[in-house]
Image (tube, coloured by chain):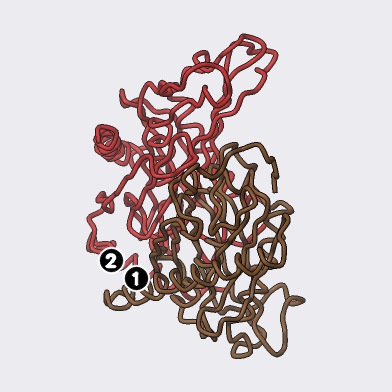
Amino acid sequence: MVELVPTLLRQELARLAEDDQRLDGRAQWEGREVSLEVDCLYNAEGSAKVVMGKTIVYAGVKFELRTPWPDRPSQGSLMCGAELRPVAHRKYEPGPPSPESIELGRVVDRGIRESGCIDMESLCIVPGEKVWGVMIDIHVLSDGGNIFDACGLAAIAALRTAIVPAERFDVGEDYKLKVNGTPIMSSFTRVGGRYIYDPSEEEELGGDERIHITLGDEGHLHSLQKGLRGVFTPAEFAEIFDVAHQRCTDLRTLVANQEGN
Amino acid sequence: MGGYGDVQLLRDDGLRLDGRKLDEMRPVSIEAGILPAADGSAMVTHGLNVAVAAVYGPMEAHPRKIQRQDRAVIDVRYNMAPFSTGDRIRPGYNRRSREISKVTAEALESVVLVERFPRSKIRVEIEILAAEAGTRCAGLTAAAVALADAGIPMRDLIVGVASGKVEGIVVLDLDKAEDNYGQADLPVGILPNTGEIAFLQMDGDLSPDEYNLAMEYNFKAAAEIHEIMVDALKRRYEGGEN
């Protein structure tokens, strides 16, 4: 059966694309305004709220003491998870984590982990006995499109403001978690045949495959992901990579400015 | 209740540790319509508690076995975010959140005109982002404002409030320390216009007189919070936004 709304929306988006236009009037590579707030959650050791259009995401960092893995006795651990709870949209149903939320959490996790911004050795308290486990939990409260970028931004901003609660666990004084870098994700969706940056909810509904690129401070790639049905060419990737580079730099500045406040 | 008698919760001057009077509640602020994707929503900040509620529907009720031929069912999910407490909570439903969801749903079904929407479902999602004792009450208040924000007809709002007992003295609106080390907790959902009660739980130890005083405090606080709820809803619609 043909789904009516996406089909009509798809036609309209294709028509707009011919004139290089978007449904909400943005240019092809133009993002929505991003608002970032850090240290906004009592009880989380680091926290951030990101608002991008109709998308609202919170991230909170918690720490726990654990015994290290036997093969890595002097390394702590980092875990990042995302919950697409039914609060965020009528399309999300209650139940065990969906493949979508698992993908989301894992893509954000890879970007942060692989950038090396957390030195796992620095999370060691007593080798072989006691290390810190750092957990970033991302909570999507409203899905208005491109939750990947919002989650990635909230996660790294929360991590960068985190205070290690050593006093509460009786292992010394509290200190600021050392984070060496600000990996940032940029996401693109094919809409009306060509890629656009920062898809809205409607563009995701009437669009095709998506590509997520996470870049570190030096402009190196740390995580890539293609999602949904569709293919792309190397030339298309080269074009969006350039855009990603610029947008990641802008958002990294936004994070740095927030921390300065 | 924790019930350790040796923790001092009242100061020598008779005030509470955070400086409140016995019948003084923590500051409350409410904002309606904060979630663009939802049909109705609200955020309640009560002391350091932050509760967000979203309403979706009325919509088709499925699975079909939950359908009622004569009325809507209200499907409530109360959930604490993993980062909302001192120690991280594992994501997912647990026994506590299931019970709170159930009694909250039953309270809301007591005020929503459910018979107007036979065979349908109204989804109410309560997310606790920060917890400092009293989250079920903050969540209930948020749910009531979110339902009103969604334009769902109701007989009345519901206000979630709690009183309790510390060091043998009845106090309004327990904070974290008072909840952990106090002797009783009495959370209720009050219909501010009719004076009826739609939500009731209690644990600990209260004499009948203490119960009466705690309830008196709860009604006083409910009247105060009710004004803040109405104000939030008015601001939402005076703002001209939809």
Left or right relative to A157: residue B119: right
Residue A105, how many percent across, how many down? 53, 41
Q: Amino acid at mark 2?
A: Leu
Residue A102, how many percent across, how many down? 59, 44
Q: Nearer the viewer, residue B229 or A140?
A: B229
Name the subunit of mark 2.
Answer: A
Left or right relative to A145: residue B195: right
Chain B shown in which color?
brown
Q: Nearer the viewer, residue A199 or A43?
A: A43
Quadrant occupied by the C terminus of chain A: top left
**In the picture, which chain is red?**
A
Task: Name the residue: 43% across, 32% down.
Answer: A159
Q: Which residue is mark 2?
A: A16
Name the subunit of mark 1.
Answer: A
Left or right relative to B160: residue A39: left
Quadrant occupied by the N terminus of chain A: bottom right
Kind of element beneath mark 2: helix
Q: Which residue is mark 1?
A: A12
Residue A188, how many percent across, how many down? 37, 47
Q: Residue furthest top?
A: A127
Kind of element beneath mark 1: helix
**Quadrant position of residue A20:** bottom left
Give the Cα distance between marks 2 and 1: 6 Å
